Image (spheres, rainbow, N blue to C red):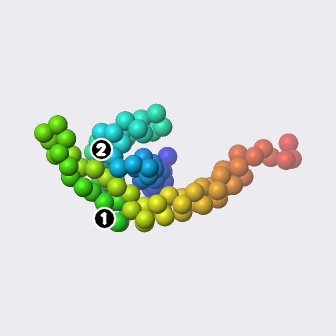
């Protein structure tokens, strides 16, 4: 898969993982595991990029005596998910065009 396309999918997956509730790194990886493989290093790169783009915010809280970063989706992050949904409809149309059988066979 094209690296830019995959990067975009991973960003949307991370945003979707925190859409309904704040979460932290390990839980995000665990929640995405049934759908897509994501390493810790890739996840934290994505989280930093999304934070820089103001699509999520970070809050540090203590958990079992350790500090843990919790990620919260912003309005910009929710908007990005909606944009992706609209783009996805177009991608499905392109996919259907590419895979359709040649009508002349």
Q: Is 16 positioned to the left or the right of 26 in the image?
A: right
Residue where numbered disc 1 is placed: 52
Identify the mark nearer the N-term, 2 or 1.
2
Residue sitting at 39 percent across and 49 percent down? 21
Crowd band around label 1 with a 10 angstrom C-alpha radius: few (<14), some (14–19), many (20+) = few
Residue at the outermost left position: 65
Residue at the outermost top position: 34
Crowd band around label 2 with a 10 angstrom C-alpha radius: few (<14), some (14–19), many (20+) = some
Residue 28 against residue 12 in the figure, above or below: above
Residue sitting at 31 percent across and 52 percent down? 71
Q: Judge by depth and name the residue closer to the eye, 24 or 94.
A: 24
- SS at mark 2? helix
Residue where numbered disc 2 is placed: 25
x then y, percent, for residue 23: 33, 46
Total residue callouts? 2
Residue sitting at 46 percent across and 33 percent down? 34
x then y, percent, for residue 75: 43, 65
Residue 87 visible to an observer of this rendering:
yes
Q: Judge by depth and name the residue closer to the eye, 90 or 33.
A: 33
x then y, percent, for residue 29: 36, 39
- SS at mark 1? helix
x then y, percent, for residue 101: 78, 44
Distance between mark 2 and mark 1 Cα atoms: 17 Å
Q: Judge by depth and name the residue closer to the eye, 82 or 35.
A: 82
Residue 69's label in the rendered image is: none
Residue 50 visible to an observer of this rendering:
no
Q: Where is the C terminus found, in terms of image quarters?
A: top right
Residue sitting at 54 percent across and 63 percent down? 83
């Amino acid at each position: 898969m094209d690296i830019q396309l995959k990067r975009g999918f991973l960003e949307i997956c991370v945003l979707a993982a925190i859409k309904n509730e704040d979460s932290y790194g390990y839980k995000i990886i665990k929640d995405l595991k049934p759908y897509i493989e994501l390493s810790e290093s890739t996840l934290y790169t994505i989280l930093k990029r999304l934070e820089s783009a103001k699509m999520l915010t970070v809050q540090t809280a203590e958990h079992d005596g350790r500090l843990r970063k919790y990620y919260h989706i912003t309005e910009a992050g929710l908007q990005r998910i909606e944009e992706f949904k609209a783009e996805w409809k177009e991608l499905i149309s392109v996919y259907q065009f590419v895979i359709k059988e040649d009508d002349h066979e």
